[in-house]
Amino acid sequence: MSDLSTKSELEKLNWELAALTGRLRSVELERDSWRARCDRLTEQRDREREKSRTLRDSGSYRLGKALVSFARDPFRTSPRLIRGLARRLRPPAGGAPVVPRQGVDPQAAKRLPAHLYVAIGLDHDALRDLVVTINQRLLVTPDHRPVVLTDDPSFSLLRKLGVLIEYLPDRATWERHRPGRAWDDLLAERLAQLCRDHSTERTVVVDRLNPPTLAELLG
């Protein structure tokens, strides 16, 4: 009887030990998962910091900062900033001067011609940078209404930037769900529709590998 009791106790202890080992392994796996997640977030933070540093050091950022400062309060903008802005915006010989305006009347804005920016293939960050650059361009010369065509499914997150964004499913998604209809035909129809709806005066095809800079849009 004593041997049976001892054997039962040993089996119980072995079971409890196995259960504790399993729980410990589960905790270790969860710990490793959190560590990996923290490492990814740290890498992402470092990448964003580097992008931010590079942007702050760029001429386009300094020009955009000067434009925003001038547009908000031209009388308090430092003379040095204004001189730098004037140098960057100085037109070629014989050209008309480019003067930032303090705003455009909403009714006048509706009468401005529309420019269609075809931004197919840009990821979300590149699309955001493009929209910001377009806004900076309009601070210098608000001479058109921008319409951006994108295949980024997260485009709605950028609507708060104030630029009209139209959506077209990317090629892979479209061919997966509608293999019987060519994506190229869909693109052609969408472009024609947008040109009709917005009476676009100009179409700009954005190179996804080399999106336009502020200087290029001003040119």
Image: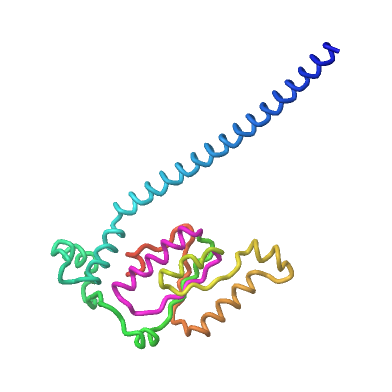
Percent position of residue 166, x then y: 52, 73
- For residue 65, what is the image quadrant? bottom left
Instruction: Identify the residue at horizontal 33%, vertical 68% (top origin).
Output: 136
Task: Please state if 22 lies on the left or on the right of 120 as rendered.
Answer: right
> Residue 206, relative to residue 28: is it above or below?
below
Q: Is residue 191 magenta?
A: no
Residue found farthest to the front: 1
Q: Position of residue 170 (x, y in %)?
A: 60, 64
Query: Residue 46, located in which quarter of the rendered image?
Result: top left
Q: Which residue corresponds to the image point at 47% horizontal and 85% vertical from the top-left?
A: 199
Dividing the image into 4 quarters, which one contains the C terminus?
A: bottom left
Location of residue 11 in the rendering, given as x and y in whole percent from the top left corner: 78, 20
Residue at image position (53%, 63%) is: 154
Q: Is residue 176 left or right of residue 209?
A: right
**In terms of image quadrants, where is residue 216?**
bottom left
Q: Which residues are magenta?
A: 123-152
User: Which of these two is toward me, 25 or 185?
Assistant: 25
Which residue occupies 58% across, 70% down?
168
Quarter of the image that includes the N terminus: top right
Query: Is 142 included in the stretch rendered in magenta?
Result: yes
